[in-house]
Image (tube, rainbow, N blue to C red):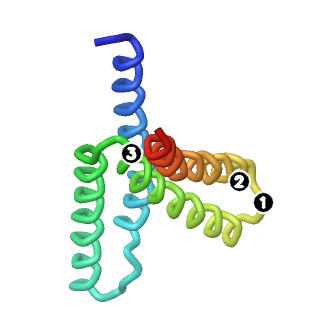
Amino acid sequence: MRVEQILSFISSWILRLGVIVFLLPLFYELWINPGSDDEIWFWVYRVFFAILYFVFSILILVLKRLRFYTFGFSLVLIASVYKLLILSYQQGLTMEHPVYILLIVVSFYFISKSERVTRRKRSF
């Protein structure tokens, strides 16, 4: 393997793990307080969120790189916008806002990267 391939492989897996770790606190927050007072629905929501996190994690790990960029960073984009709105509503302007704005920008970059790469391959 060439050095470029090794670096690409390592960075791809670091990004995958980063997305999975980023989604963990969001799903943990939903796990702690799923939003239902009824005991049955409380556990139904908990099981649903646990299965959803597990499915997202598996998908992130098995998708090809360009599909991962689109799917994984779409999840990061949605989660960042959600956290930004919740944070703004609950606490007003805080020091965490720039972090979520940066994550939104980085997500747009990786989502659009797959389109740029496929366009470049078609033009040759």
The quadrant holding residue 8 is: top left
Kind of residue sitting beneath label 3: Leu
The residue depicted at 59 percent of the width and 52 percent of the height is 108
The residue depicted at 28 percent of the width and 79 percent of the height is 42
Cα gap from disc 1 to disc 2, whole angstroms = 7 Å
Kind of residue sitting beneath label 2: His
Pointer 2 residue:
97
Q: Is residue 38 above or below residue 112?
A: below
Residue 14 tag number: none
Mark 3 or 2, nearer chain start:
3
The answer to whether the residues at label 3 and label 1 have Cβ atoms under 8 Å apart is: no
Kind of residue sitting beneath label 1: Leu
Dot 3 crowding, Cα within 10 Å, few <14, some 14–19, many 20+? some
User: The N terminus appears in which quarter of the rendering?
Assistant: top left
Q: Whole-percent x and y of residue 27? A: 38, 60
Q: Residue furthest front?
A: 124
Cα gap from disc 3 to disc 1, whole angstroms = 35 Å
Q: Is residue 21 above or below residue 11?
A: below
Mark 2: which secondary structure? helix
Q: Whole-percent x and y of residue 92? A: 76, 65
Side (left or right) of 84 relative to 68: right
Side (left or right) of 89 relative to 38: right
Side (left or right) of 110 relative to 44: right
Pointer 3 residue:
66
Q: Residue furthest right?
A: 93
Q: Is residue 28 above or below residue 21?
A: below
Pointer 1 residue:
93
The residue depicted at 61 percent of the width and 53 percent of the height is 104
The answer to whether the residues at label 1 and label 2 have Cβ atoms under 8 Å apart is: yes
